């Protein structure tokens, strides 16, 4: 198989790139107006013409000329983004693309201690928002005190999402993960420092391309680290590891949340009010389900936290909405104070 087909080049992308009269390439790294890209027989460094959009890691581009130049790019099939920091809004888009054409977002969750379910839930929502398929990768299963119990808890917290148990020590789950990528898919591993991402990537790549923690400690590992951010998996597929892509931010829309919480979304359709917030509204099917145990209270709590985080994201992104919300809260406080004054003056009649 062609080296690029092994990492996802298909007829559709080929046809799109053919319009540019260059050869297909996949970006593995960008820096200062240049890209490093994989081509069918190796790697090229190509310039990006002034004024052209700068590709990101994972993009499919067409490269031509000597010295090589990026002459076109294929439409992205999903992208991992984050809102641009304030003050950086001069850019055309309010979002910064961190990686393109990601099929699988793996939420790396160590199970040597009790997993942080709220973090996993957020990760699942973010994965769906980016248009990718979420996968929960439980790591360090060799250190789990009650592996079966922990796996069951994770599965309950992520309805409809595959949860894969892995261990770099026993090798468990590594082949299954490799099989997920073998069809040319691209994955991103998300998780805090120390959860086992580098170790997992090394196991997948059957090489020490990523410096793991111990190696970092003595500084020798630095030299063995390649500067590619898109790593090719020997059996097919790729893993993207870009700086700044250790976690994502919630985008603020409800689609990801509804995909991550299909049980709550389905119940919500039965609520009396179509815009029910499932707080204290009459005829709320979600509250009813929590009351009769059809929906676990903790799961509903997870849903509420995602909603709160989404609403915050919307407010942050829209200063006018933020001002409206502050005014609304101010009015509520003033009304509550007025009511309290009235009560204290007129007694509790
Ligand atoms: P990263 O910061 O997410 O890339 O985490 P690392 O891959 O550097 O791993 C952090 C630590 O966890 C290292 O000491 C690893 O040796 C250890 N570790 C990673 N995976 C496993 C595993 O499956 N089992 C055990 N016992 N330790 C692991
Ligand atoms: Zn409701």
Image (spheres, helix red, strand yellow):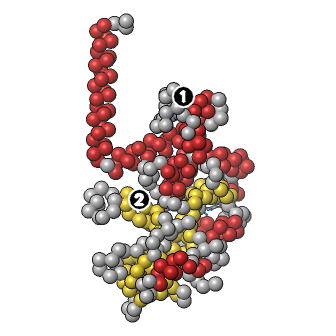
Q: Where ligand 1 lies, by image quadrant?
A: bottom right
Q: Position of residue 86 (x, y in %)?
A: 30, 56
Residue 232 vertical placement versus 295 (above, below): below
On residue 21, the disc is none
On residue 283, the disc is 1
Q: Position of residue 41 (x, y in %)?
A: 54, 89
Residue 31 visible within the image: yes
Quadrant of image for the N terminus: bottom right
Q: Residues within 10 Å of mark 1 (few under 14, many from 20)?
A: some
Q: Earlier in the sequence, mark 2 or mark 1?
A: 2
Q: CA distance from mark 2 to mark 1?
A: 37 Å
Residue 98 vertical placement versus 120 (above, below): below
Which residue is found at the position 59% from the left and 70% from the top? 185
Which residue is found at the position 66% from the left and 49% from the top? 155
Residue 138 visible within the image: no
- Foreground residue, 258 or 199? 258
Which residue is found at the position 56% from the left and 66% from the top? 103
Q: Position of residue 87 (x, y in %)?
A: 27, 58
- Foreground residue, 72 or 56? 72
Disc 2 residue: CB within 8 Å of ligand 1 = no
On residue 82, the disc is 2
Which residue is found at the position 32% from the left and 49% from the top? 318
Quadrant of image for the C terminus: top left
Residue 62 vertical placement versus 111 (above, below): below
Task: Tell me which corner region of the image, top left, top right, bottom left or bottom right, holds residue 40.
Answer: bottom right
Disc 1 residue: CB within 8 Å of ligand 2 = yes
Q: Position of residue 71 (x, y in %)?
A: 39, 83
Query: In terms of secondary structure, where does tag 2 sit?
Result: strand
């Amino acid at each position: 198989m062609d080296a690029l087909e092994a990492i996802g080049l298909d007829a559709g992308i080929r046809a799109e790139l053919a319009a540019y009269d260059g050869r297909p390439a996949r970006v593995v790294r960008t820096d200062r107006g240049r890209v490093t890209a994989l081509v069918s027989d190796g790697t090229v460094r190509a310039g990006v013409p002034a004024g052209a959009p700068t590709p990101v890691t994972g993009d499919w581009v067409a490269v031509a000329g000597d010295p090589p130049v990026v002459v076109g790019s294929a439409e992205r099939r999903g992208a991992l983004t984050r809102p641009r920091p304030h003050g950086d809004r001069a850019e055309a888009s309010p979002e910064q693309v961190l990686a393109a054409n990601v099929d699988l977002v793996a939420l790396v969750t160590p199970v040597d201690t009790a997993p942080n379910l709220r973090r996993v839930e957020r990760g699942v929502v973010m994965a769906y928002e980016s248009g990718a398929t979420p996968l929960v990768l439980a790591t360090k299963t060799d250190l789990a005190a009650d592996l079966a119990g922990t796996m069951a808890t994770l599965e309950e917290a992520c309805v409809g999402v595959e949860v894969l148990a892995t261990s770099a020590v026993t090798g468990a789950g590594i082949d299954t993960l490799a099989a997920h990528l073998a069809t040319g898919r691209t994955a991103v591993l998300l998780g805090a420092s120390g959860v086992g991402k580098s170790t997992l990537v090394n196991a997948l790549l059957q090489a020490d391309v990523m410096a793991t923690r111990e190696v970092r400690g003595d500084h020798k590992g630095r030299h063995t680290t390649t500067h590619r951010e898109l790593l090719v998996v020997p059996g097919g597929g790729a893993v993207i590891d870009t700086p700044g892509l250790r976690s994502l931010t919630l985008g603020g829309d409800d689609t990801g949340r509804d995909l991550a919480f299909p049980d709550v979304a389905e119940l919500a359709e039965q609520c009396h009010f179509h815009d029910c917030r499932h707080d204290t509204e009459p005829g709320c099917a979600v509250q009813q389900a929590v009351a009769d145990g059809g929906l676990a209270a903790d799961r509903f709590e997870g849903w509420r936290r995602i909603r709160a985080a989404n609403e915050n994201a919307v407010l942050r992104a829209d200063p006018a909405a933020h001002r409206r919300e502050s005014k609304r809260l101010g009015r509520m406080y003033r009304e509550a104070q007025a009511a309290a004054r009235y009560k204290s003056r007129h007694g509790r009649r």
